[in-house]
Image (cartoon, helix red, strand yellow):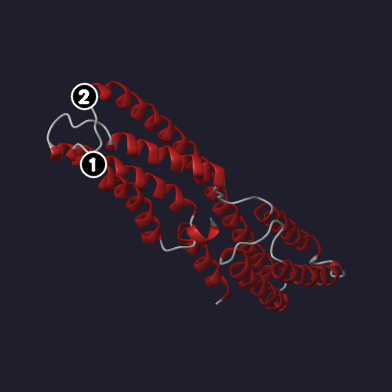
Amino acid sequence: MESFLALPTWVIIGICVVIPVVICLVIVPLVISGKYATQSEDDTVIGPSAAFLGTAFTLLLAFVIVNVWTAESAREEALFREFSQVEDVMLEVSVIDPAMKQEFHDSLQVYIDSLIAKEIDEAAPAGGAPETNAAFNDFLKVADKSQIALAGDATKASEASGLFSEVQALISERQVRVNSGGAHLDVIFVAVMALLGIITVLLVAILPVSSSRKSKWIQSISVAVATGLIMSLVFYISSSAYSHRAEQGQIERIHELFN
């Protein structure tokens, strides 16, 4: 599944649309030529069956789309909050003690670079990538050392508490992000969706020809294309292309902070 979702968007859409269209190209000529014999009475059975399966297909798709979209939006929001917290930490340290700003800057930049490379560009395990966790721990060591240094300065002790509150908030935001799952398509859901979609397309394709051949082709192809496009939407929301596009603005914003 992950390999499929990593494909370019146009390839995903093409695969989803081509499969049901090919089914129509095979079945409809057989129905029109009479090699697959159908009677007008068959419409009373096939029609309601196609309508029922189409409704089931639509409802399941709606459920999956809402859940996948919600999970992906929550992931984007968690990343936004974490990057915002990094900005707050940098602002606080620059106000409290500019001499410490460079050390904070360097350690946070290493962390951000690792976060982007190991937890955004690649699928990270629950709890975060080991390399990124190590980079974040190195930053925390810098923060602890600064806390000890500022604690001895009575003029900065109260302000320093605000800085380390921001650091604690950054720790919390990171934990929320790395321990919350992003958009994930279950293989069973995908299999059921695909099966319902294919059966719906098949039933529409074998409906008796009640009018012109042109109308039969329009009916069958339109259902096939619509089914494929809707399926491709589910895959697109879960794909690497969609998540990277949504995260790119956040990445550009945080890069501006360190450049």
| Label 2 CA crowd tier, 10 Å (few <14, some 14–19, many 20+) | few
Circle 2/circle 1 CB separation < 8 Å: no
Q: Position of residue 138 (x, y in %)?
A: 76, 72
Frontmost residue, 20 versus 162: 20
Residue found 49% across the figure and 36% down from its top: 63
Judge whether 206 appears above or below 113 on screen.
above
Q: The disc labelled 1 sits on which kind of residue?
A: Leu
Q: How crowded is mark 1: few (under 14 residues within 10 Å), some or many (20 or more)?
A: some
Q: Which of 159 and 209 is in front in this view?
A: 209
Disc 2 secondary structure class: helix
Q: Which mark is residue 54?
A: none
| Residue beneath the point at 70% across and 75% down | 107
User: Residue 8: image x %, image y %?
Assistant: 42, 63
> Element at badge 1?
helix
Disc sitting over residue 40 in the figure: 2
Horizontal side of 216 relative to 110 (left or right) equals left
Quarter of the view holding residue 175: bottom right
Q: Which residue is drawn at 56% across and 49% down?
A: 184
State the image quarter where residue 145 is shown.
Answer: bottom right
| Distance of label 2 from label 1 (alpha carbons) | 16 Å
The quarter of the image holding the C terminus is bottom right
Query: Toward the viewer: 82 or 59?
Result: 59
Residue 116: x and y in percent read 59, 68
Q: In which quarter of the image is residue 174?
A: bottom right
At label 2, which amino acid type do we have?
A: Ser
Residue tagged by mark 1?
30
